[in-house]
Image (cartoon, coloured by chain):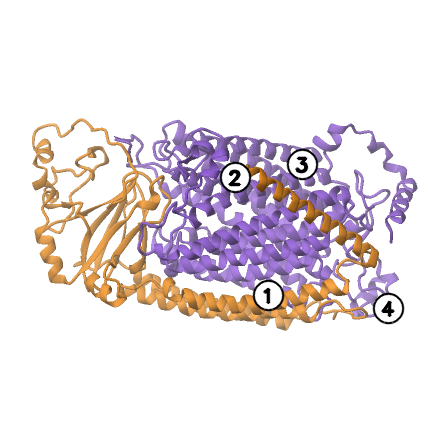
Chain colours: A purple, B orange
Amino acid sequence: MSSTDIAIHQTDMHHGHDEHEHHHDQNFFEKYIFSLDHKVIAKQYLFMGIAWAFIGGFMSILFRLQLGWPEATFTFLEPILGQWVQNGKLDPEFYLALVTMHGTIMVFFVLTAGLSGTFSNFLIPLQIGARDMASGFMNMLSFWIFFLASVIMFISIFLETGPAAGGWTIYPPLSALPQAIKGSGTGMTMWLISMALFIVSQLLGGVNYITTVINLRTRGMSMTKLPLTIWAFFLTAILGLLSFPVLLSAALLLIFDRSFGTSFFLSDIYIAGEALSQTGGSAILFQHLFWFLGHPEVYIVILPAFGLVSEVIATNARKPIFGYRAMIGSMLGIAVLSFVVWAHHMFVTGMNPFLGSVFMFLTLIIAVPSAVKVFNWLATLWRGNIRFTAAMLFAIGFVSLFISGGLTGIILGNSALDIQLHDTYFVVAHFHLVMGAAAFFGMFCGVYHWFPKMFGRMMDEKLGFVHFWLTFIAVYLVFMPMHYVGIAGFPRRYYNWTGFEAFNIFTDLNTFISIAAILGFAAQFIFLFNFIYSIFKGRRATLNPWHSNTLEWTTPINPGHGNWPGEIPAVYRWPYDYSKPGAAEDFIPQTVPFSQTQSSNLPQERVLE
Amino acid sequence: MITIAIGISILLLLVVLFQLFRIGTLASIFRGSSQKAAGTTKTSNKVNSTMLLLFLIIGGAAFVWSFAAAWDDMNQPLASVHGEWTDELFWTTMIVIGIVFVITQILLFWYSYKFQHKENKRAYYYPHNNKLEIIWTTIPAVVMALLVFAGWKTWTKITSSAPADAVVVEVMGKQFNWMVRYPGPDGKLGVTKTTLIDATNEFGIDFSDPNSHDDIVNPLEIHVPKGKPVLFKIRSRDVIHSVFLPHFRQKMDAVPGMPTKFWFVPTKTTSEMQSETGNSEFKYELACTEICGRGHFAMRYVVVVDEPEDYEAWLAKQQAFAVQNPDVVAKFTSAAGQKPATEEAPAPVAAE
């Protein structure tokens, strides 16, 4: 199909169904800024996510410079970092601030808001057959509160005392006492305000996602006919709704301790030449509250990626996803278990060893549903007819990274082994592979795959291949060697490690990791170029460029407000009828009734004809 | 001038890359490959699937090679009884997950290569197989159960309470160094109070408690005897720190307001380790592994493992804090016991 054809086709559709012509009289602000349309809000989340990802990535490059070349002087950084570089040496507190902000930005602003915010918003109404979210207004509020949170966090980077610097987990007393570290002054206050707003934004979004999935499915779209993407977003939203309020309470109590002299987390402290009056608090209590969100949070990050990857693998392997119900079951299992494993982050905090045993047991159970998912993806690839689109490559890369990073979780979940490995680079390698890089791969996979639906144009596939290969190789080069230094006990969040004889043997490996990280970061500019260029100049998309079954590809190329001109299509079958024997094409969209596919119907489907 | 030159070269490079990209796009339109459904172009499928296979082979080889090359460095010399258990459990688990890692990665990349798109081929419609799914749910569950059991047994032994005759050492974290206290001949540590801390009495020892009078404070190095249980009583006086002894495979957080502990049995003296590693400078080190501020990276302390008789000799030479600082103790014996707090500037100083 050439581009001219499509253009004509599209106008046809619009003239054919003029029933939502009345939506078109929006002004610029209503349409693009304070839009109630889920597709526009999704794009707003995506742009914000990408912007934050580059900021967070750049921070990692700065601290990798310090780690890779601990003896070097970085005078060339003075123009951008100002007082944080003295005589070419990075300030140790600024180093900690970089690490902290990198974590906060990546976990919350990119992989939670940027990933769920983009794809839950974009795909839920389109894939379940709804005109929009249950509440467009709440959805808009959700984005703009996130925007406000982003602005506050961004401003905090430029404070004279620096942004929050106590690690992204902000354990008190370090985060509670400005005497302990400069970043715990105004920087921490702004971190807490920003995160409180962020949580509000997540809750507004989450309520919307859940309501929409439950109430607004089109005719025939039962829960067992939903694409796995929707199941993933649905469970993610439930996790967020149940766990984020706990972080809000932790943040609130921390605010009280910081500003109003309460002792929730503080006790027996002597700092900066004086004994504090706070007594009776428990620093460990904060960790329990934090990780009660913190652990579900890693699944909030990875579940949407599960969904996106499952969908892309099935479409491009031209096969039904293997074990659809097992895939849903394992996601449910992971979602439930994710609430009862949090204390595996705290094996060496001095909590009761018996509690450690319980959490080790629960943590290792969660490996079972994760293993099932991997086996099912592999079985989906088996005897497929695989189309290597850029999205598919990222999906395959995702599975590889998820395996590599997930397996070491079995070691870290074992409390006896965690003694040596806790807070070392082994942990850093583990979670960067399994929820950092893997979730990013899920996100890239989603962007390449649904770009045509978002912008009506295709991203350049060849640039996508280059982007994939450079990123994939760089990720492994960065994180594989980190396991080696981690096994040796190399501690994380160390500004400089040359003072220790046990750790100063790793100069070469650290330099190597830093070079790989810089290359990997540079490769992301290929993506950025491809993304921006393709929005304006990309090849025009066809109606269903990937020959996919799901509902979003039945909308016009550039769906307007309300998604479908005319009636919303009804759904007759599950979304994975790929390569069904006897069918004319190797895909049967969900909107095709069984009466039209008699040649390919299975025995149990005959009654539905 | 150099900056401008670099800037111009980068700009030119970008322009060249952009032109190459344009040529590529135009060529694909000319060849007609842009007309085909995405992912069905023969060459690009071939290239990508072959690269996936190459990635498996070359990446796998590089992994094996780098792992072997880093082997000596990643295995820190081991010097504790329980460290042998955890090291063994660690490498056993590594073998288990290593097997899964190799099988799944090979299948992933091999399937990707083998089942690449071909014209006129249909994928195999295979939506589920209950038997297969039950098998591959059960196997990981059984393996996990075994690993949990092994971990639980080891963990319980390690975290059991210390023997009564254990050598007690108190380790206190503060920004940014460690402070160490031995109970002295009576074997009992004196009571401490946060409010009693000042520049001299950094532990806040309450000298009205008779147990405190023989306490030994801040020796240059931590000395412990070989072959005897050693109990570290750990606390912090400001923010959370963490006591990490990589060679003893030990780690425990130092939490303000909540004393923690761990015990272990050192198996090799420092000099034995020096001859074993062939490094005459070898020292057991204590590092902080919980982010605690500016000087987090510099909280180093040296642990010396002695033969028991050398340890006793060393201990006998140490002077009690009360003897070294009679004026501090005098304040407790004279009436009030409260004294003006002296200003103490926190500075990023390593223990050395």
Distance from Cα at disc 2 to Cα at disc 3: 18 Å
What is the secondary structure assignment of the residue under circle 4?
loop
Residue for badge 4: A599
What is the secondary structure assignment of the residue under circle 1?
helix
What is the secondary structure assignment of the residue under circle 2?
helix
Q: Which mark is residue B74?
A: none
**A544 is higher (above) or lower (below) than A8:** below
Which numbered disc, 2 or 3, marks the residue that appears first in the sequence? Answer: 3
What x and y, as percent, mark residue A499?
A: 31, 49
Q: A264 and B51: which one is in front? A: B51
Q: Is residue A487 left or right of residue A524?
A: left
Q: Amino acid at mark 4?
A: Ser
Query: Nearer the observer, disc 2 or disc 1?
Result: 1
Given the image, what chain letter belongs to the residue carrying mark 4? A
Residue for badge 1: B55
Question: What residue sits 61% from the left and 53% below the top?
Answer: A441
What is the secondary structure assignment of the residue under circle 3?
helix
Q: Which mark is residue A139?
A: 3
Q: Amino acid at mark 1?
A: Phe
Query: Nearer the observer, disc 4 or disc 1?
Result: 1
Q: Quadrant of residue A55?
A: top right
What x and y, as percent, mark residue B254?
A: 30, 46
Q: B86 and A364: which one is in front? A: B86
Distance from Cα at disc 4 to Cα at disc 1: 42 Å
Residue for badge 2: A245
Distance from Cα at disc 3 to Cα at disc 4: 44 Å
Q: Where the N terminus of chain A falls, by quadrant?
A: bottom right
Distance from Cα at disc 2 to Cα at disc 1: 43 Å
Question: What residue sits 8% from the left and 53% below the top?
Answer: B316
Q: Amino acid at mark 2?
A: Pro
